[in-house]
Image: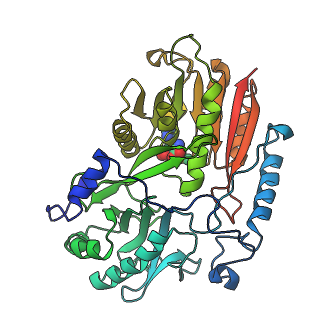
Amino acid sequence: MTKALGPGKPGPRASSCHARHADIPPPRKGRPGITDNGPVTAAFCPLHVSGACRSCPHQDSPVAEQLAAKQARVAATLTAVPDDAWLTPVPSAPMRFRNKAKMAVSGTSTHPVLGILGPDGVGTDLRDCPLHVEEIERALPVLARTITRLGLEPYDVAGRRGELKHLLVTASPDGDLMVRWVLRSHRHLPALCADLPRLRRELETLAVMSANIQPVHQAVIEGKEEVLLTQEPGADHVLMRLHLPDADGPGRELPLLLPTRSFFQTNTAVAEHLYATASAWAGDVTPIRAGEPVRVWDLFCGVGGFALALAAAGRRVHGVEISAPAIEGARAAAALMGLSEQDVSFEAGDARVLDPAGAQALGGVPDLLVVNPPRRGIGADLAGRIAASGIRRVLYSSCHPESLARDLSLMAPLRVRRAQVFDMFPHTDHTEVLVDLVRD
Ligand SMILES: C[S@@+](CC[C@H](N)C(=O)[O-])C[C@H]1O[C@@H](n2cnc3c(N)ncnc32)[C@H](O)[C@@H]1O
């Protein structure tokens, strides 16, 4: 449920928000890539060194060593991948790669703490976390001052008092910001609305602001209700303008649209490599019926990263995703790219119940299936149907090698031809893996 609320007057960014989508301006120069901000050879974060934050357990090791260890761990987990199928891992910049900050808010409205909560309920302030892109680092102190100005009392978990639970801030590659206030109730919405013009003067690239209402006392960060505070046309999503690299050419643009409450890969530069690699690997897929376009399904498609990269390269793609806002974003991005419903279609629904062999309305078994599920994987039922469907190629992108290993064991007719680690989450044990499966 997304409602609009606010003073009803378009703010100063109204026309520019709208214009960005009609004609896309050239990309910002100097945006960070996967090898930018240099090799890091020792821990660089004072909170890691002091032990106050344990989010980056491997920060003491040089990034090349971390990645080699990660590759070895993933290879040991994925026994279905032959040794010679592994390609060189794709590294990440060691710092300034995170496009999203998920800050638990604690302390008081006069002295808010933006960061993580310890088991004792005491917060550690991470507003200077060097993993965040610079736009986020610049925005967090401004948002902390807004908390004080408006008297937004942080939620006290133990006492079950207070209003402000989390601040969720996303920065686009062009520096546009999406700010979401996770609140216990509607109480402070009028004050946030009234303050919006001032906040926009202080945060000039603020494109989207919303309140997420999370009334229940639960560990779940977000609630079901989202109230949009920026109301002008186009101010309900940010343009995530990706640039897909190409080994032989200048690369190409992939303009994705991110509404509130939608998943987006947190490491923009590594996501660009992931989508570009999937698109390149799909290059040798041939259609079952000669002369027809290659037909692709992208399951768990989010806002359409894989689907739109493949559709832009001439494949006919159908994306399925459970989040209706994400599907709206994917459809709008397709229109922005000039792709028709025939080129790429999207459906809000449960991908786990689909049967690639039974979808006659979509032209029967697709030539290529892309799956990128949440951590728990695609599950035994969908894996079994894929195995039985006769589908000849599958690209499986996973953020959890353990569930990928289990799913691969259930799709035995499909053999791993190649696999690659993408260091989406440096300094941690987490990783993204893309595997290319073929039916012998
Ligand atoms: C790891 S994200 C991948 C999104 C997208 N492929 C991308 O690259 O941004 C997994 C996605 O699966 C969606 N999802 C979760 N359960 C689902 C289900 N049962 N059916 C369809 N989509 C689901 C989530 O909303 C999320 O967008």
> Does residue 399 appear left or right of residue 250 in this picture?
right
Residue 312 appears at what percent x and percent y?
A: 47, 33
Residue 184 appears at what percent x and percent y?
A: 35, 69
Quarter occupied by residue 183: bottom left
Kindly tell me whether residue 407 is visible in this rendering: yes
> Does residue 182 appear left or right of residue 69 in this picture?
left
Q: Residue at x 44, y 51 (%)?
A: 241
Q: Is residue 96 above or below residue 296?
A: below
Q: Residue at x 64, y 49 (%)?
A: 399
- From the viewer's side, name the closer residue of 313 and 157: 313
Residue 133 appears at what percent x and percent y?
A: 51, 68
Quarter occupied by residue 49: bottom right
- From the viewer's side, name the closer residue of 382 and 156: 382
Residue 80 appears at what percent x and percent y?
A: 80, 36
Q: Is residue 60 above or below residue 286?
A: below
Q: Is residue 208 above or below residue 259?
A: below
Quarter of the image for the C terminus: give it. Answer: top right
Q: State the residue lying farthest toward the bottom.
A: 110
Q: Residue at x 51, y 31 (%)?
A: 313
Q: State the residue lying farthest toward the right.
A: 83
